[in-house]
């Protein structure tokens, strides 16, 4: 964890600092602080941070639940080819969570994740 780098704007350091706060590693556990750092990294197009921010909105951890924001951030990560985000976005479409239900669109995102070897997406398509 390198807080100085995170404060200087390094997206990877911000992402890692977010994890440190979320897990309470080397700092007091604080979901709100984790979200703060993930948002900073996500705004710099860090796919992992975008995905974690989406999960935070989905689960209401460190901020209020918000499906629209969850889908916004998971889409950004999915568009950067993060397989876990593609699988999650597919699920949003398939189930109509935060977006209009569209099983074809959901399946499309699952296919993209599966093409990267993401087994969970393959299982969903079975």
Image (cartoon, helix red, strand yellow):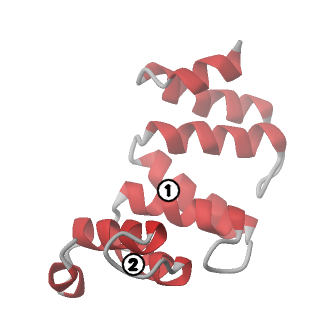
- x 45%, y 66%: residue: 23
Residue 37 numbered mark, or none: 2
> Label 1 belongs to which residue?
51
**Which residue is found at the position 50% from the left and 29% from the top?**
113
* Residue 21 spot, x, y in % from top left: 42, 75
Q: Are marks 2 and 1 in contact (CB under 8 Å)?
A: no
User: Which secondary structure lies at badge 2?
Assistant: helix
Left or right of 5 on screen, residue 88: right
Residue 47: tell me if it is visible.
yes
Please tell me whether mark 1 sits on a helix, a strand or a loop: helix
Name the spot of residue 110 as percent of width and height, x first: 60, 28
Is residue 44 visible in the rendered image? The answer is no
**Above or below, 122 relative to 28:** above
Observer-nearest residue: 55 or 93? 55
Q: Is residue 26 above or below residue 45?
A: below
Q: Is residue 1 above or below residue 7?
A: above
Quadrant for the C terminus, please. Answer: top right
Q: Earlier in the sequence, mark 2 or mark 1?
A: 2
């Amino acid at each position: 964890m390198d807080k100085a780098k995170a404060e200087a704007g390094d997206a990877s350091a911000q992402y890692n600092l977010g994890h440190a706060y979320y897990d309470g590693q080397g700092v007091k556990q604080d979901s709100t602080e984790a979200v703060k750092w993930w948002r900073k990294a996500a705004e710099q197009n860090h796919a992992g941070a975008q995905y974690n921010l989406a999960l935070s909105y989905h689960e209401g951890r460190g901020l209020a639940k918000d499906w629209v924001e969850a889908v916004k951030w998971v889409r950004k990560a999915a568009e950067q080819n993060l397989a876990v985000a593609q699988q999650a976005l597919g699920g949003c479409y398939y189930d109509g969570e935060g977006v209009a239900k569209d099983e074809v669109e959901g399946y499309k995102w699952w296919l993209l994740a599966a093409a990267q070897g993401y087994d969970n997406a393959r299982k969903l398509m079975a």
